[in-house]
Amino acid sequence: MSNASLTALGKIGFFILLPLLAIFVPTAWLERRRSLCIIKNLTGHNCPGCGMTRAISSASHGHFTQAFRYNRLVVVVLPLLAYEWLKALTRATRSYRALRGR
């Protein structure tokens, strides 16, 4: 197996495991942690993206009302993230198949 095909296979594995991270990390754990937002940490003010990590986590657990309360932009961002994830997974899979000669 060539180095390029191993890299492509690693990308496929990464893209498959990425949504599992959102599913298996509980939203309560994120709530207890300090905010990931640099703007909020530096200024103390919320930015338009504040709460998006918790919103995506809540949505991935099926709590859509709670996700909407964390950040209303989740209704736009989550479908876009899902689309980009699927596009990247498809691209990595095609790359792997092309390298393997299938």
Image (cartoon, rainbow, N blue to C red):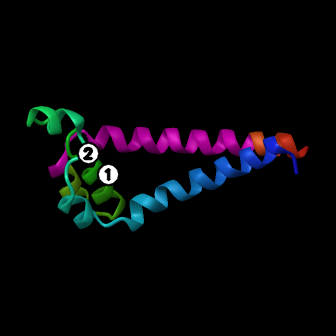
Examine the image and state in which quarter residue 38 appears: top left
In the structure shown, which secondary structural element does the residue marked by tag 2 occupy?
Answer: loop
In the structure shown, which secondary structural element does the residue marked by tag 1 occupy?
Answer: helix
Q: Nearer the viewer, residue 42 or 15?
A: 42
Q: Nearer the viewer, residue 44 or 5?
A: 44
**Label 1, on which residue?**
56
Examine the image and state in which quarter residue 76 appears: top left
Residue segment shown in magenta: 69-94
Q: Residue at x 19, y 58 (%)?
A: 66
Along the polypeptide, which appears first: circle 1 or circle 2? Answer: 2
In the image, is residue 26 part of the stretch drawn in magenta? no
**Label 2, on which residue?**
36
Q: Residue at x 16, y 39 (%)?
A: 41
Q: What distance separates the C-alpha of mark 1 from that of mark 2?
A: 14 Å
Image x and y of residue 77, in percent: 34, 39
Image x and y of residue 27, in percent: 26, 63
Q: Eyeballing the image, is 4 above or below 61?
A: above
- Residue 58 is left or right of residue 94, and the answer is left
Image x and y of residue 23, in percent: 40, 64
Q: Residues within 10 Å of mark 1 (few under 14, many from 20)?
A: many
